[in-house]
Image (cartoon, coloured by chain):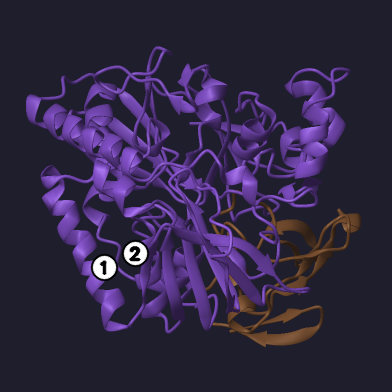
Chain colours: A brown, B purple
């Protein structure tokens, strides 16, 4: 299974969440806050919204709650995009 | 036939569904996840979950987000999390069992917003569900016995665990545990043995008081704590880390119960002897009514499911529920949150992660006579106004500002405006 993150291919394992794929690939953050600070996963179960990203053009998807699907196009997000 | 809807397919919800079916009800059980089990029974995708027997006797709705309830009317979106094109459904059962569980409670400390700082639950969810280790050099810190299985899960996926730190001293922890908890103590001994095999030290009376790094966490500072969690000066120790996992107990997720109109006591849903809430036909079970773990949640779920179906819970069910509840109370006494934790914070420490409101801003606003009350505090500082709606910071903001935490979030789960505007509701 493979997804792209800001155009770059990232391999994953079938059934992993988007957050799992990104962390396994060594990425710790993929969103920036209003102040520009980086954020990644914090709560891991959908309560904190730190891990938001854009999946196939749909913004504000919680990476920890969404299963990655082969071919997903992921874009990282900043608060300004929202 | 009595129609029962159960929200949440963790230990409480699954037990509720099983007992409601047994009492003759027609049961629909929903969960946000695509697999049953909740956080406790989280499995890698495709792994057998062992709940087929229960689910085959219910209507099972995975990937179902309950975003609102009014009375017993349940509004559901079905489809992938935060997706588009989800279907809107409305359920109107005779009885509703809420078993929405809890998430980690984490106290703020300098640097807790850095990537690489996770809740203890996140580390376990990623290990159990995704088979991913959050780091190679990890510190696990906070309060409560949950830290031990978290460390075990981390070790199981190859993470290096530098230490597990329980903030409470041995004298406090000993107060709660007793010979009556032999079964639980045995479980803990097994975790302790797993840590020992991997040479992971378990320290009491010590915690992580600061995370450092620019783009991500690179160092963690730990310190010795007094019983009230004030730092003993000069006891700081710095670890080189690539991840920190922190949990100071759990916060229940009462949004749907609040929306239904259920009365709360100290953040937990108030229930009667058969798990009945203050609203007719609405029952609550599991971490919603108090933090007690999976066994307590299942015991409460069994009582709630039976009562929701119109049955009378038998003595054995009630006895088991009371036993596990008493254990939960002792656990809370053994692993309290020390009142002096705000001493770890600095002026510029972020408390509200979403809006980046600092401790300094909050304490100044709380002391400003021109802005009295929680509403003025919220509008003035933006604490709790971000996407998590105070789920992460609520308890900390309340403690710092001397106000009561509020759980009134108009929408329990985020939905898109297009979904809200869509008139096509399917009655079921």
- Crowding at dot 1, Cα within 10 Å, few <14 / some 14-19 / many 20+, comes out as some
Is B357 drawn above or below residue B192 in the view shown? above
Q: Secondary structure at mark 1?
A: helix
Please rate how many residues cluster around mark 2, counting C-alpha atoms within 10 Å: few if below 14, some from 14 to 19, many from 20.
Answer: many
> As drawn, is B396 to the left or to the right of B4?
right
Position of residue A47 relative to residue B281, above or below, is below
Chain that bears disc 1 = B
- Res B138 label: none
Judge from the rendering whether residue B405 lies leftward or rightward of residue B261; answer left or right.
Answer: right
Mark 1–mark 2 CB contact (< 8 Å): yes
For label 2, the residue is: B149
Residue A44: x and y, percent?
56, 60
* Element under disc 2: helix
For the residue pair B275 and B332, the one nearer the viewer reads as B332
Q: Residue at x 14, y 35 (%)?
A: B320
Q: Chain ID for label 2?
A: B
Q: Which disc number belongs to residue B191? A: 1
């Amino acid at each position: 299974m493979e997804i792209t993150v800001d155009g770059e291919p990232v391999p994953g394992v079938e059934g992993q969440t988007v957050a799992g794929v990104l962390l396994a690939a060594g990425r710790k953050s993929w969103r920036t806050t209003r102040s520009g600070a980086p954020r990644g996963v914090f709560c891991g179960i959908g309560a904190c919204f730190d891990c938001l990203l854009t999946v196939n053009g749909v913004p504000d998807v919680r990476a920890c709650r969404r299963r990655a699907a082969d071919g997903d196009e992921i874009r990282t997000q900043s608060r300004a995009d929202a | 036939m009595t129609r029962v809807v159960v929200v949440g397919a963790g230990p409480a919800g699954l037990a509720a569904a099983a007992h409601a079916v047994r009492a003759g009800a027609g049961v629909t059980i929903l969960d946000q996840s695509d697999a049953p089990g909740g956080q406790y029974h989280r499995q890698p995708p495709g792994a057998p979950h062992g709940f087929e027997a229960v689910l085959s006797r219910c209507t099972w709705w995975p990937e179902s987000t309950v975003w609102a309830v009014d009375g017993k009317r349940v509004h559901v979106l079905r489809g992938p999390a935060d997706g588009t094109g989800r279907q809107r459904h409305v359920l109107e059962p005779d009885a509703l069992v809420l078993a929405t569980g809890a998430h980690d409670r984490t106290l703020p400390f300098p640097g807790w917003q850095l990537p690489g700082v996770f809740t203890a639950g996140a580390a376990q969810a990623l290990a159990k569900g995704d088979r991913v280790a959050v780091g190679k050099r990890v510190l696990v810190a906070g309060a409560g016995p949950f830290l031990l299985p978290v460390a075990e899960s981390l070790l199981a996926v190859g993470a290096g665990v530098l230490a597990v730190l329980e903030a409470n001293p041995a004298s406090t922890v000993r107060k709660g545990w007793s010979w009556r908890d032999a079964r639980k103590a045995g479980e803990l001994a097994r975790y302790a043995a797993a840590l020992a095999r991997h040479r992971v030290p378990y320290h009491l009376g010590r915690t992580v008081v600061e995370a450092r790094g620019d783009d991500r966490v690179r160092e963690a500072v730990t310190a010795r704590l007094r019983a009230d969690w004030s730092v003993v000066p000069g006891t700081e120790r710095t670890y080189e880390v690539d991840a920190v996992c922190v949990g100071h107990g759990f916060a229940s997720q009462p949004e749907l119960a609040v929306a239904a109109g259920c009365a709360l006591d100290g953040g937990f849903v108030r229930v009667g002897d058969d798990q009945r809430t203050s609203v007719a036909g609405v029952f609550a079970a599991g971490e919603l009514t108090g933090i007690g773990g999976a066994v307590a949640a299942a015991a409460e779920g069994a009582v709630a499911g039976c009562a929701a179906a119109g049955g009378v819970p038998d003595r054995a069910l009630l006895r088991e529920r009371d036993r596990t509840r008493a254990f939960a109370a002792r656990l809370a006494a053994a692993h309290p949150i020390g009142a002096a934790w705000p001493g770890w914070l600095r002026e510029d420490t972020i408390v509200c992660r979403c809006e980046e409101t600092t401790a300094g801003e909050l304490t100044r606003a709380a002391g400003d006579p021109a802005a009295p009350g929680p509403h003025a505090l919220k509008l003035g500082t933006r604490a709790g106004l971000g996407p998590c709606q105070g789920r992460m910071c609520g308890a900390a903001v309340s403690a710092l500002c001397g106000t009561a935490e509020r759980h009134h979030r108009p929408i329990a789960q985020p939905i898109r405006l297009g979904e809200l505007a869509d008139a096509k509701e399917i009655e079921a």
